[in-house]
Image (cartoon, rainbow, N blue to C red):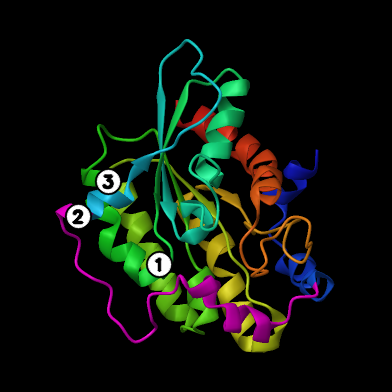
Amino acid sequence: MEITILEKQTGLEKQTRRWPLYGVGLALLQAAALAGCDRGAEAPAPAPTANAVASVTESVAEVPAPSGPERLILAFGDSLYAGYGLDRGQSLPDAVQSRLRRDGINAKVVNAGVSGDTSAAGRQRFAFALDNMPRKPDLVLIGLGGNDVLRQISPAETRANMTAMLDEAKRRTIPVMLTGMMAPPNLGPDFTSQFNAIWPDLAKRYDVALYPFILDSVIGNTKLMQADHVHPNRTGVDRIAARVAPVVETALGKAD
């Protein structure tokens, strides 16, 4: 299966060569700035408050939960998790939950995606999101980095923020799965090599599951992307979920 190749592929040179095929230049991505969902590069992330609970919502899935013990998953990320531009129940966490349930796993995915979040903003609210779960999750999916590359934030800063979140999850003995991000070659070899190495390096260091590039197989395909060329449409989300869900299943199995 192709997903097996993605799980094992940590040679970033193969993935980097895919960027020219997407037909989406860096200038377009930066102009889109996540379609206006960016909260502003200069504005500091707000401190978590009680209102932040609203950003942690249960996914609504069409597939009923099968019998068996419930597996609680926290999907923690940016607009690619939040479901920007999609109707309620059509986000990636929703689609992953539906696929897990079709496979007989009684999964409940809590969507803590916040549009515009950088890794720094995610780091600031990560512990708060975990504290507001009904119980310790069986798995946390972390999907951040897209806004970091749009703002050309230092890869060292992104790495430090991702590391802090993984340290927090480790401290709480919560298994993690990373859905990675990649920088286009337009940013130069130094930036791209440092940025792209973050996710495979951390996955190896913390022994966590990894889906190397969340937009793999959809970005650049107008039939799978919204008009902003940055966010997948419902069909694109389903394509991503079909490739991500098997990795989630494997991660849940290792967490048993």
User: Which residue shows up at 51% across the image and 14% down it?
Assistant: 66
Residue ranking furthest to the left: 50
Q: Which amino acid, mark 2? A: Asn
Q: What residue does disc 1 label?
A: 117
Task: Work out how far the residue at label 3 is from the one at label 1, CA to CA, in angstroms.
Answer: 17 Å
Mark toward the viewer: 3 or 1 = 1
Task: Work out how far the residue at label 3 is from the one at label 2, CA to CA, in angstroms.
Answer: 15 Å
Residue 245 pos. (x, y %): 61, 37
User: Which residue shows up at 45% across the image and 79% down it?
Assistant: 156
Which labelled disc corresponds to residue 130?
Answer: 3
Asked if the residue under mark 1 is in contact with the one under mark 3, i.e. CB atoms within 8 Å, the reply is: no
User: Which residue shows up at 21% across the image and 45% down it?
Assistant: 131
Q: What residue does disc 2 label?
A: 51
Residue 48 pos. (x, y %): 20, 61
| Figure quadrant of residue 173 | top left
Mark toward the viewer: 1 or 2 = 2
Question: Which residues are drawn in magenta?
Answer: 23-51
Which quadrant would the N terminus be assigned to in this image? top right
Residue ranking furthest to the right: 21
